[in-house]
Every structure is written in C-alpha cells, then in structure tokens.
Image (cartoon, rainbow, N blue to C red):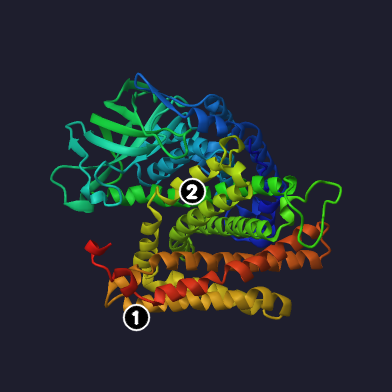
Amino acid sequence: MPTYTAPVKDMQFVIHEVLKASEQDIPGYDELDRDFTAAILDEAGKISSEVIAPLNVVGDQEGVTLENGVVRTPKGFKDAFDQLREGGWTGLDCDPEYGGQGMPYILATATGEMFSAANMAFMMYPGLTHGAYSAIHAHGSDEQKQTYLPKMVSCEWTGTMNLTEPHCGTDLGLMRTKAEPQDDGTYKITGQKIFISAGDHDMSDNVIHLVLAKIPGGPDGIKGVSLFIVPKFIVKDDNTPGERNSLSVGKIEEKMGIHGNATCVMNYDGATGYLLGEEHKGMRAMFTMMNEARMGVGMQGLSQAAVAYENALAYAKDRLQGRAITGAENPDGPADPLIVHPDIRRSLMDQKSFVEGARAFGMWGATLIDRAHRKGDKQAEGLISLMTPVIKGFFTDEGYDMTVLAQQVYGGHGYIEEWGMSQFTRDARIAMIYEGANGVQALDLVGRKLASDGGKPAMAFFEEIKTFIKENSDDEDLKAGFLDPLKTASKQLQEAAMFFMQNGMKNPNEALSGSYDFMHLFGHVCLGYMWARMAVASKAALAAGADDRDFYEAKIATGRYYMARRLPACAMHVARITSGADPVMALDAANF
C-alpha cells in the first residue's frame, strides 16, 4: 500500500529561502518565522501521514453508499474528519471573527497540498466548504454571515457548490433550475443539479448548498442567474438545524476515481432558499468560490503527482531489475535497483522537476493572493487572476501525466490494484475536468485574462522576469544554465501573445486554436522562472556554508534538468500557435 511523507523541508525552503516570506511587507507575514511555520507544517504532515493517508485506499475500495436517503462515507472518514476539525485545520486561514485562525493563505496552500496528497477524496469535503464560506463571506449579508460562517469555519456544517445540470455544464445560461420569490423574502428552489461533490454525507450536522437558479422574469441566459443559500436543514432562530428542507439525493455517481467523495445528483423540490448577493448577479458571487476552487484543483493535480512520485522513487530504489549498462552497481545482489537505468532516471527527473517547480509556483501564487487580500494590491490581484487558469490547467494536465509516469516505474505492478498506484492516476483525472475543463481554462486565459486591464498583468509578469534576469546576470554559471533558457522561453511566450494580438481580432479562431498550447507555454515559463529563483536561493545557501549541501546541490541539478529537458517544449508550443487556425479548422464536421 502506498505511503505518504509530507515534504516539510522542501516547503520550508520555498517559503523562507525562495519567497522570503517573513521579509515581505504583507500584513501577517512578519510572524512567519521558521519555527512558527515548522510547527504548523510538521503537525499537518503528521496528521496527513498517520490519520488521513491510511484512509485513502479505504475510501477508494469502499466508496460511499446511499441508504434510505442517507449518504454513508467510508469507514474511518468521520473520525478523521473530527480530528481535522478539532485541530482547527478547517479554519486555518479563515476570518477570526467567525472562529478562524486568520493565518495567511500561503500556509493553507502548503497544508492543503499535504492533506490532498494524503487523501484527495476526503479533503474535498472541507475544501468545498471553504469555497462556500468564501462566497458567503464576500457576498452575504451580516445576518447570513453570522448564521452560517461560524459553523462552516469549524466544519460542523459543510458546504457545496451547485452549478451543473444534466443538459448544461459550462454553458450555465441554459440552466432550468427555478427560484420562485415568496412573500417572506425567501425563494422556492426547484430543479436538478448533477456532479455535486460532497453533496451529502454523515460527517456534519448540516450541508449548506450554494445553488445557481433563475428567478422567473429575469434576463435571458447567464445574465439572469442568481445564487441562493439552500441548507439541508432549515436553520432555527437559535442557529441549530431544524426541519429538513425539500431537497434530496437522487443518486451517487459511479466514477473513475475519488470514490471516497460523495458525488451526488441533487433534487430540489420547492426547497427554501435565501438569495446570496444581488438578484441576477449570481455568477459574480459564484466566481468567488470558483476562482478559489480552481486554485485548489490545480494544487490537487500537484498533490497527486507528489505522492505518486514519492512512492515511485521508493520503488525504483528498492526493486532489483537488470544491470546498469556501465557495470554492476549492486554486485552482491542478483540485479541492480531500477534507479540505475537512464530511462527510469528520466521519468523520475520529469516527476521531481515538475513537483518541486509547481510547488514553488503554487506558493508564489498564494503570496499574490495574500498580497491582494491583505494589502489591497491591485497589481497582485491582476497577476493571480492571470495565473489562475494556468495553475488550474497546467498543474492538472501535467500532474496527471506525472502519475502515469510514476505508475509506469512499477511496470506491471503499477497496473495491479494492490500496489495502489492506479488510484493516484484515477483520482488525478477528474482535476482536468471539474471547476471548468482545461480547454475552458485555456479559452479563459487567452480570451479574457491575457487582455484584461489592457494587458497590464501580462506585461507586469514579463517585466518581472526581465528584472530578475538582469539582477542575476553577473553569475555566468547561473546565466548559462538558467537565465538564458528562461529569457528564450519568455520571448517565446511574448511572441505567442503578439501573434494573438495581431491575428485574433481579425479571426478569433487564430487565437482560440492556440489557446491550449498557450496555457502550457505559460506554465512552462512560470516553472522555469521558479527554478531559476530556486537556483539563486540554493547557490546563496551553498555560498553561505549551508550544512545540507546535498539538498541544495540536488535543487540546482534538478533545475538544470528542467531548463534543459522540459523548458524546450516552449518552442514546440509557439510553433503550433503560430501555425494558426487553418490546420485545426480545415476539415468540415462531416469529414471527421
């Protein structure tokens, strides 16, 4: 059975030596010294490995069940959920006014990666709750906040998001769920929603659904959508669950992965709902939750790659197969370990360089969120808005691919369920689809985010890389191995963006046909930037006489691998982009 050990040392390196968190001028970051973050990360790692991870296989094998209208979670889930709640982990970065601990988002990002790597399906229950909390916190009335948020911060009550219907997924303007106004100011919600993660379960006292629906007489399409709070149990005046609302679970979906999470069909039969935010402005409120969820899903892609790599690495060091081509490295044994073979090394280096690069990128993104929220920094807000579809799309595409590579290290055993590697691949697959399929993320990046605010966020990103390269150009070794490849990749990204600007207005298909490649091109440039920053930090540590030289030298070697073997994919992506729409759109539909 797979195991999980949290990468605390690597996270500490990113937080303190790469991002220099405690030196930043973000409110609350001055408290993030090494001892403080180590205490949090160590404890989160302990819970991840000892409490949550052992239930990953249990959840996969048992799944959830629907018994007489009641959803039952796998054995051990409720006890683990209680431990997570009692430790305050569900409210780590939530508002202290409602019982949260008010810590920076960067710590929630780090602990979230650990928890998700340990058990992705399990962590979706508090994860969806946090998103619903954020939507109510941003758009709810004072009364709604006081009613729901304290219980959601503690996860005594959990939350969901209800968007998709049987006939509409991405195109939410087609939804049919209705919200009929009542004389008392409430609404009667009627309709069916599908694919509702954590839609119902037995681990909390109430489930607070956020449901998109249309008020009759409103504008057509997406402009007529409103958002409603629809609790499983109506909340009484004393803030305890009262009578059951008119909603039910129609069925539990049978899925490829994340078996431990209850993916529900939800039926609303005149259920009592409460308007969240303004009428017909539901998407604005829901996007608060969706943008957070997209960041979280991106980190799910990373987390599955991380835990799969950890286990593949252990297997490659232990499994004896064949001899090294240059001579036996385990002469006293019948064969050498797998890790001596160059192709296994290539696979592991692909995985390691993605996981560690993406971890740094995700935490850098978290600092942008903290800077935007805690300091009101509009430039940071614009930059993380630009990066969100990249983190969601690139992390989950690459993360899935890395789980496949990890599975491949095991050979035939990787395909056998008792080794547990297939679960990481099966669980990771959904992250490419939900919260906006990755093709939609690419369209959002090119069609909306790239040109937002006159293109200022994109230009700020290019300028940041240019400044970084200039500041470190005196180091010839760094220049050759990191800065020059990063400079080339950045120019390729700018070339692709310019192609869209010059051709996309005349023919939008010229831009949209290259959007997926652009998302990956952008992702590679971001990881290249992170590896260059990690190389600078590692060289500084070595120059200062760091005790753990192996750690820093391994960082530099891994970064060199990424720049030499992975970053050149940028040239392929820009070539595809500049080939334009003709190769993509040439065939009539009938000729496919």
Q: Residue 109, percent across and down? A: 56, 49
- Are the residues at dot 2 and dot 1 in contact (C-beta closer than 8 Å)? no
Image: 493 above or below 277: below
| Residue 579 visible in this rendered orientation of the protein | yes
Residue at the disc numbered 2: 296
Q: In the shown orientation, is residue 552 left or right of residue 353?
A: right
Q: Secondary structure at mark 1?
A: helix
Q: Residue at left 63%, top 57%?
A: 347
Q: Residue 150, percent across and down? A: 46, 33
Lower position in the chain sequence, tag 2 or tag 1: 2
| Residue 20 visible in this rendered orientation of the protein | no
Residue at the disc numbered 1: 502
Q: Residue 264, percent across and down? A: 36, 33
Kind of residue at disc 1 = Gln
Q: In the picture, which quadrant includes the C terminus? A: bottom left
Q: Residue at left 58%, top 47%?
A: 407
Corner quadrant of residue 361 = bottom right
Q: CA distance from mark 2 to mark 1?
A: 34 Å
Q: Residue at left 75%, top 67%?
A: 540
Q: Residue 565, percent across and down? A: 61, 68
Q: Secondary structure at mark 2?
A: helix
Kind of residue at disc 2 = Gly
Q: In the shown orientation, is residue 350 left or right of residue 337?
A: left
Q: In the picture, which quadrant includes the N terminus? A: top right
Q: Residue furthest left?
A: 217
Label 1 environment density (alpha carbons within 10 Å; few <14, some 14–19, many ≥20): few
Q: In the shown orientation, is residue 418 left or right of residue 450?
A: right
